């Protein structure tokens, strides 16, 4: 009788433990830039008034998982920067087992009038083993080093054109004044 009680209790405990197991989820994908893992914050440098395209492109590696579906993304970025999300434009909807995909995940607009300096951002990729999963597959922390636009130095031909235009304007003004003086004397 005691053996049956222990056996029943053991089966009950096993059933309870199996009922509380967590659902299957995918391991994170590895994000690389130029063959280097992107775990630490990545710093991109851009010029104010332009759109920054991260270079080299991002590589998403799926190792140790079956096919992974890329189902969504989100991001945080300091104002006044504007992030343009390109995950579904430049990447396939899924990455096969032991496969990878390379492309531009996002671009960042650096608007005119912003203050030069470091700005922070984070980019998140969601997905999983099915087209409906929303597990966090990757987090990319980055900084944008916004540099002021440099003032271009005019070329010599620009200086010559400017000087000849000012010379012509001066000649017109001089001839008109001279013409007025001659008319007033007459």
Image (tube, grey):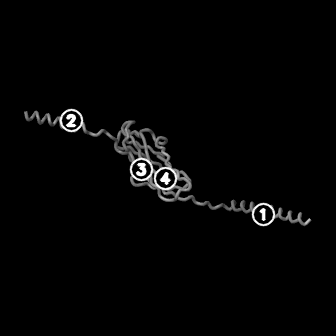
> Mark 4 vs mark 2: which is more N-terminal?
2
Mark sitting on residue 181: none
Question: Is the residue 33 above or below the residue 22 in the image?
Answer: below
Dot 2, how many residues are within 10 Å of its Cα: few (below 14), some (14-19), or many (20+)?
Answer: few
Between marks 4 and 2 in the image, the one whose residue lies nearer the viewer: 4
Q: Secondary structure at mark 3?
A: strand
> Mark 2 vs mark 1: which is more N-terminal?
2
Q: Residue furthest right?
A: 186
CB under 8 Å between callouts 4 and 3?
A: no
Q: Find residue 63 and report its horizontal and vertical position in percent.
A: 36, 44
Quadrant assignment, res 19: top left
**Which residue shows up at 78% across the image and 63% down it?**
170
> Mark 2 vs mark 3: which is more N-terminal?
2
Dot 1, how many residues are within 10 Å of its Cα: few (below 14), some (14-19), or many (20+)?
Answer: few
**Distance from Cα at disc 1 to Cα at disc 3:** 60 Å
CB under 8 Å between callouts 2 and 1?
A: no
What residue is shown with label 2? 15
> Mark 1 vs mark 3: which is more N-terminal?
3
What residue is shown with label 4? 79
Dot 3, how many residues are within 10 Å of its Cα: few (below 14), some (14-19), or many (20+)?
Answer: some
The answer to whether residue 34 is seen in the rendering is no
**Distance from Cα at disc 2 to Cα at disc 3:** 40 Å
The answer to whether residue 185 is seen in the rendering is yes
**Distance from Cα at disc 4 to Cα at disc 3:** 18 Å
Choose between 130 and 169: the one closer to the eye.
169
What residue is shown with label 1? 170
Dot 4, how many residues are within 10 Å of its Cα: few (below 14), some (14-19), or many (20+)?
Answer: few
């Amino acid at each position: 009788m005691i053996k049956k009680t222990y056996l029943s209790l053991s089966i009950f405990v096993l059933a309870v433990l199996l009922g509380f197991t967590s659902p299957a989820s995918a391991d994170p994908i590895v994000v690389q830039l130029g063959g280097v893992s992107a775990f630490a914050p990545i710093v991109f440098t851009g010029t104010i008034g332009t759109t920054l395209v991260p270079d080299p492109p991002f590589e998403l590696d799926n190792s140790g998982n079956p096919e992974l579906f890329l189902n969504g993304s989100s991001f945080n970025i300091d104002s006044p920067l504007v992030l343009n999300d390109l995950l579904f434009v430049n990447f396939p909807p899924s990455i096969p087992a032991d496969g990878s995909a390379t492309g531009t995940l996002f671009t960042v607009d650096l608007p005119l009038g912003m203050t030069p300096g470091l700005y922070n951002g984070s980019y998140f990729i969601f997905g999983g083993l099915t087209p409906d999963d929303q597990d966090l597959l990757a987090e990319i922390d980055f900084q944008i080093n916004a540099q002021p636009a440099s003032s271009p130095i005019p070329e010599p031909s620009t200086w010559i054109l400017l000087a000849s235009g000012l010379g012509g304007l001066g000649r017109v003004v001089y001839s008109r004044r001279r013409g007025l003086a001659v008319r007033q004397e007459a």
